[in-house]
Amino acid sequence: MTTLTRATPVTSRTGERALAPDLARGAMLLAIAFAHAPLFVTAVDRGPAVLNTITEFFHLVFVNNHARPMFAFLFGYALVQLLNREIDRGSDWVSARKLLRRRGWWLVVLGFAHTVVFAPIDILSVYGLTALVLVGLLRRRDAALLWTTGISLVPATAAVAFGMWYPLSEGTSTFAAGSMAAGDRGFGALLVDRVTAWPIGTLLFAIIVLPAVALGMWAARRGFLEEPVRHRRFLVRAAVITTVLSVAGAVPAGLVQAGVWHDPSPEALWAVATAQPLTGYAGGIGLAGIVALVAIRAARRRGRLTTMVEALGQRSLTLYLFQSLAFVVLFYPYGLGLQDDLGLAGATAVAAGTWVVSLFLADAMRRVGYRGPAEILLRRLVHRRRSGQDASGPR
């Protein structure tokens, strides 16, 4: 059997769980909430026009196409961490690969269930499919990961750019208003729509997130998030460059959307629609680097907020599902029915409030030593065969 060596330390030098990855996942959930909540309203232009314009500019520059790459980067990072833990337990490559693929399949199943129960805004099945496709790269050289990142960046960027070009050319919101809203339809009609769109949507978004997942795998081999002090100089340079690049690439789209840049040529519009998602990959990944730098200082003086965000990151799967539940309850007509009452600014405020509530929920679970129901379920599903083997084998 093929033996593997560890790619990078899973824990900090003190033996404690590294802080930066959990902080990054906790911050990521805020970006995901910002990105998802506006999709549940039927009219993003409802409410004060100036406030909505400012909010959309903020989304275009700092949220849209930034949240997804950050999530994907951290998912790829976690794949290497999971592989390392299997190696520490004495697993060979075949056993580790089977476990990671089993985890990918269960994520696909949980993602489908999430789509059926909540809304067609799932990312779990997307990452499960991506894990199934990329797990073989975990034993390949760095060059393979970097080539995968570069080559897949072309179709990924093109897919998002095509989706952005029409609203920018028509002067409408870049948010697909009501794309996740229920409208006047009942649950049965919504269910048919979700199940029908799920396969194509999962495949499309898997293409979109693939570059960041592969790059996250490359970064994890170097332990950038586990040992931010050792990599401080690189993280500072990377954070500055990626942030400047992402803002510069997104501002033109914001100016077009705000009406400041009038009647751009078709060529300029295509350039704008392409630059925003392309540089968004840099911004999303750079945001993870910024969080790693923040973790250096936060680790020295752990305040209440640091502990809460860390707890949130450790339960990101559970609290991601909580976000979907909260949005369905708040926006759908069989809940509070706010889908027709809030515009972009209002939905963004709801997203922030939902994230704050999730902070307190995560902290409450931390206090009682509860890992999180979704994390516990996934672990039991993935490790069920191993548990059975352990039970029947020698102790």
Image (cartoon, rainbow, N blue to C red):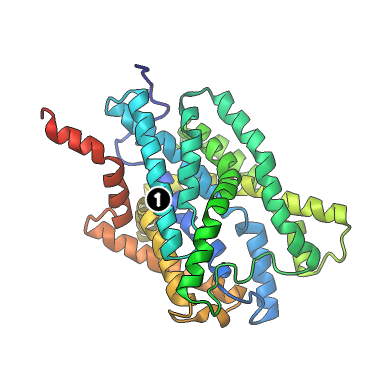
Residue ID at (51%, 62%): 194
**Residue closer to the observer: 341 or 226:** 341
Residue most extreme to the left: 395
Q: Dividing the image into 4 quarters, which one contains the N terminus? A: top left
- The residue closer to the viewer here, 145 or 106, is 106
Q: Residue at x 49, y 53 (%)?
A: 123
Place of residue 190 in the rendered image (x, y in percent of width and height, measured from the top left) = 50, 69
Residue ID at (29%, 56%)? 373
Across and down, in percent, residue 159 comes to 68, 49
Left or right of 14 in this view: 262: right
Which amino acid lies under the numbered mark 1 shown in the image of this protein?
Val
Above or below, 366 relative to 292: below
Residue 244 visible (yes or no): no
The residue that label 1 is drawn on is 109
Q: Residue at x 62, y 58 (%)?
A: 64
* Label 1, residues with CA under 10 Å away: few <14, some 14-19, many ≥20: some
Q: Tally the numbered discs.
A: 1
Q: Is residue 142 visible?
A: yes
Residue 152 placement (x, y as % from top left): 64, 37
- Determine the secondary structure under disc 1: helix
Q: Position of residue 357 (x, y in %)?
A: 39, 69
